[in-house]
Amino acid sequence: MTTMTSREANQDFSRAKREAKNGPVIITERGEPANVLMTYDDYRRLAGKRQNILDLLAMPGAEDIELDLPERKIERVRDIDLS
């Protein structure tokens, strides 16, 4: 996933558009993510239907996304009386 400052994106918007063909481009302001540039097809895919994790992970550049998933709790299985 590409990251550009707001100034870089403004000065070389053609490059930002080229990079967006390979995956979302994060545009930062004062060092913090502020905007995302992506292709219209990627946008339609996200906006046109309910999002789920599989759709997000299928996007170009998703392999660079860091996920901080909560630890899964394994609960004890209970006995059930089926008699």
Image: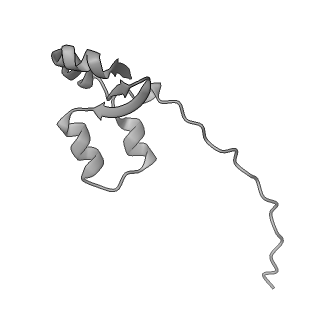
Q: Quadrant of the C terminus?
A: bottom right
x, y percent for residue 30: 41, 24
At which x and y percent is residue 53? 45, 46
Q: Name the residue at the bottom extreme.
A: 83
Q: Residue at x 80, y 63 (%)?
A: 77
Residue shown at 41% from the left, 50% from the top: 52
Q: Which quadrant would residue 58 be assigned to in this image?
A: top left
Q: Residue at x 32, y 29 (%)?
A: 24
Location of the N terminus by quadrant is: top left
Q: Nearer the viewer, residue 23 or 80?
A: 23
Q: Residue furthest front?
A: 30
Where residue 16 sits in the image (x, y, percent)? 23, 20
Q: How many marks?
A: 0
Residue extending furthest toward the left:
14
Judging depth in this view, the residue of 29 and 13 nearest the camera is 29
Quarter-wise, where is residue 42 in the image? top left
Q: How is the image coloured?
A: one colour
In the image, residue 38 sits, relative to residue 10, either above or below, namely below
Location of residue 48 with respect to 69 vertically, above or below:
below
Between 35 and 80, the residue placed more toward the observer is 35
The residue at the point 37 percent across, 51 percent down is 51
Query: Looking at this view, is 34 or 60 the one in front?
Result: 34
Q: Is residue 3 left or right of residue 70?
A: left
